[in-house]
Image (cartoon, rainbow, N blue to C red):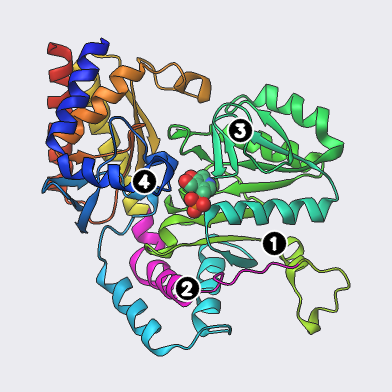
Amino acid sequence: MDAKRLTKARSAFADRNPQSRRQYDEARKYLPGGHTRTVLTHAPFPLTFAAGDHSWLYDVDGHTYIDMLGDYTAGLLGHGDSRVLDAVEAALRTNASVGGIHPAESRLARLMCERFHLDRVRFTNSGSEANLMALTTALQATGRSKVMVFRGGYHGGLLYFASGTAPWNVPYDFIVAPFNDAAQTSVLIAEHGHSLAAVVMEPMLGSGGCIPADAAFAQRVFADAHAVGAVFIADEVMTSRHGRTGMFALLGVKPDIVTFGKYIGGGFSFGAFGGGAELLDQFDTSPESGRTKVLAHAGTFNNNIASMTAGCVVLGEVFTADTAVAHMTRGDEFRRSVSSVLARSGLPVCVSGFGSMMSLHALAKTPRNADDVARRDVALQELLFLGLLERGVYSAARGMMNLSLTLTDDQLAQVLDALQEALAALRDA
Ligand SMILES: Cc1ncc(COP(=O)(O)O)c(C=O)c1O
């Protein structure tokens, strides 16, 4: 796609969104880049939203969008779920939780242990923190220093492996293995086995382009990690929405530690890591434990009443295991429809994903790893994103779409129409 077309599309976007531009220019005076989430950056500037309602978003220029991003999976419930908001409001008004224990914390812990088949769980403020704590758990349990991750993986702001290990990452001794390449990964595990503390893996590269792991790959990595005594950490921060107990279970793997985040907080900040008693009870500081060596895990807001209460409503009432299965099926069906629209366009575009998470790619062939994703036609990718915005569909600049529970069939049909129109406009240009 030619650069002229991109310039034209960007300037049409800027013309349509003068208030967002104003907000952005003002924000940039105080916030480097105009915001605090790098992922939101795109040319010419990101939109500013004034409100949201179920699966609708309203920007400050008065445009209405169908929210197909679902806040990068955190917005599974859509906007303004009254069950969560009422419960949180009541809890904040009545529970003096500052600096103490309250029942919602253990209630949510029980819900999580039962749902995700964990012995124990601990809460954090974000998925990033959950992964850092999971790593600490593994490093301390094994007394080893190395951590295997996968190219294209993302486990938090300081655990970023889009193309190797980022210079701003936490200074662990990382081995970066190729995703969906069992043979190469086995070689690396064997090579570093005696010093390998943990293997950290997403069952589907989320930020890396919604690329599911092959079941055989996931199972082999798990077996190889165990064979050398390393802890297998499953990053299900995005993917625990799939199936009854998260996506690794669907791949036939039972991880040692699982990390969580995003939607479970119902819109409030959330993270958790859980697993077997042997690993997690390193944090048992109770007098009853009789342990001589214990690990500390502090955090002022770890058990904050808003997140704990919201989590109880999310897992206990809204997103039950049955709902999770139905939502996954709905996502699979919608992705098949997207795939047909893309195929009919005659352009080099495809979709990857699993269940209710997916990503559009300006690629002729569905990617299997980060190297494939890096070959995308970046101009076409951006034009498609801008074309969807122009037609009232909000997705991620990098192509990600995540279905929320509030999307109606009618809205999904509108998204398919918008996609078809956007592609036709690009093809005819
Ligand atoms: C797989 C995965 N792990 C961890 C994180 C980090 O979670 P948080 O943004 O809550 O720190 C993310 C966030 O996108 C993620 O996608």
The amino acid type of the residue labelled 1 equals Gly
Q: Earlier in the sequence, mark 1 or mark 4?
A: 4
> Taking 54 as reference, is 226 above or below it?
above
Image quadrant where one finds the C terminus: top left
Determine whether the residue tagged by mark 2 lies in a helix, strand or loop. Answer: helix
| Residue 119 visible in the picture | yes
Task: Give the distance between the C-alpha atoms of the residues marked 2 and 1, in whole angstroms.
Answer: 21 Å
Residue type at the position of mark 2: Met
Furthest toward the front, the residue is: 29
Residue 391 visible within the image: no
Mark 3 or 2: in front is: 3
Q: Which residue is mark 2?
A: 308
Amino acid carrying label 4: it is Lys
- The Cα–Cα distance between marks 4 and 2, rounded to whole angstroms, is 35 Å
Q: Which is more N-terminal, label 3 or label 1?
A: 3
Q: Disc 3 to disc 4, how far (Cα)?
A: 27 Å
Task: Give the structural element (helix, strand or loop) at label 1.
Answer: loop
Q: Are marks 4 and 2 in contact (CB under 8 Å)?
A: no
Q: Position of residue 347 (x, y in %)?
A: 25, 14
| Most foreground residue, 134 or 252 | 134
Q: Residue at position x 73%, y 41% from top?
A: 172
The residue identified by callout 4 is 29
Residue 276's tag is 1
Please state the extent of the stretch shown in magenta in the rendering. 296-324
Mark nearer the viewer, 1 or 4: 4
Q: Amino acid at mark 3?
A: Ala
Q: Is residue 235 left or right of residue 27?
A: right
Q: Which residue is mark 3?
A: 166
Residue 316 among those drawn in magenta: yes
Q: Is residue 308 magenta?
A: yes
